[in-house]
């Protein structure tokens, strides 16, 4: 398997997940889907986005995705957006985020665990 490649199937999965995330961000203003389901889905989006271009073991991608999500949340804890002077930039507030939450960390773990259910290659650890 080549390290760098383009996988059309994973691209379309990532694209669909991206659209779902955008729709949640724009139109869902509740106390469950937006704050919790959105954080679970973002783990899947990152995972399939990476799988689109990188051909390594699914487990490695899943673990990297979880650590990446933790890193972003930790950056929120340390208010990275303010350190970078981007607190007034809407795009940065969306991408980087503005507030740390232990619930978000739990959602990332749930998203990571669900990957084992929804991705056959991860279960087989190819």
Image: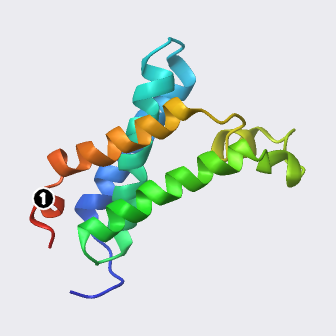
Q: Is residue 119 visible?
A: yes
Q: Nearer the viewer, residue 49 or 47?
A: 47
56 w.r.t. 9: above or below: below
Residue 51 in percent (x, y) is at 32, 66
Residue 109 in percent (x, y) is at 38, 43
Residue, x 56% and y 24% (percent of image)? 26
Task: Looking at this view, name the residue that lies furthest to the bottom.
Answer: 2
Task: Looking at this view, name the residue that lies furthest to the top.
Answer: 30
In the displayed structure image, the side of residue 44 where residue 22 appears, left or right? right
Task: Looking at this view, name the residue that lies furthest to the right.
Answer: 85
Q: How is the image coloured?
A: rainbow
Q: Nearer the viewer, residue 57 or 5?
A: 57
Which residue matches tag 1? 123
Residue 66 in percent (x, y) is at 43, 55
Residue, x 36% and y 52% (percent of image)? 14
**Which of the image's four quarters has the C terminus?**
bottom left
Residue, x 11% and y 57% (percent of image)? 120
In the displayed structure image, the side of residue 21 where residue 58 appears, left or right? left
49 w.r.t. 3: above or below: above
Element type where label 1 sits in the image:
helix
Residue 105 in percent (x, y) is at 49, 40
Labels in figure, total: 1
**Which of the image's four quarters has the N terminus?**
bottom left
6 w.r.t. 14: above or below: below
Callout 1 environment at 10 Å: few (<14), some (14 to 19), or many (20+)?
few
Q: Is residue 19 visible?
A: no
Residue, x 28% and y 60% (percent of image)? 10
């Amino acid at each position: 398997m080549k390290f760098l490649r383009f996988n059309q199937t994973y691209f379309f999965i990532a694209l669909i997940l991206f659209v779902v995330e955008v729709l949640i961000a724009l139109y869902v203003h509740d106390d469950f889907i937006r704050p919790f389901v959105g954080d679970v889905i973002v783990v899947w989006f990152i995972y399939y986005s990476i799988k689109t271009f990188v051909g390594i073991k699914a487990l490695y991608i899943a673990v990297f995705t979880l650590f990446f999500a933790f890193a972003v949340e930790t950056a929120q804890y340390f208010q990275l957006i303010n350190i970078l002077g981007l607190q007034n930039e809407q795009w940065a507030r969306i991408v980087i985020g503005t507030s740390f939450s232990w619930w978000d960390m739990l959602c990332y773990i749930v998203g990571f665990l669900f990957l084992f259910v929804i991705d056959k290659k991860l279960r087989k650890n190819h």
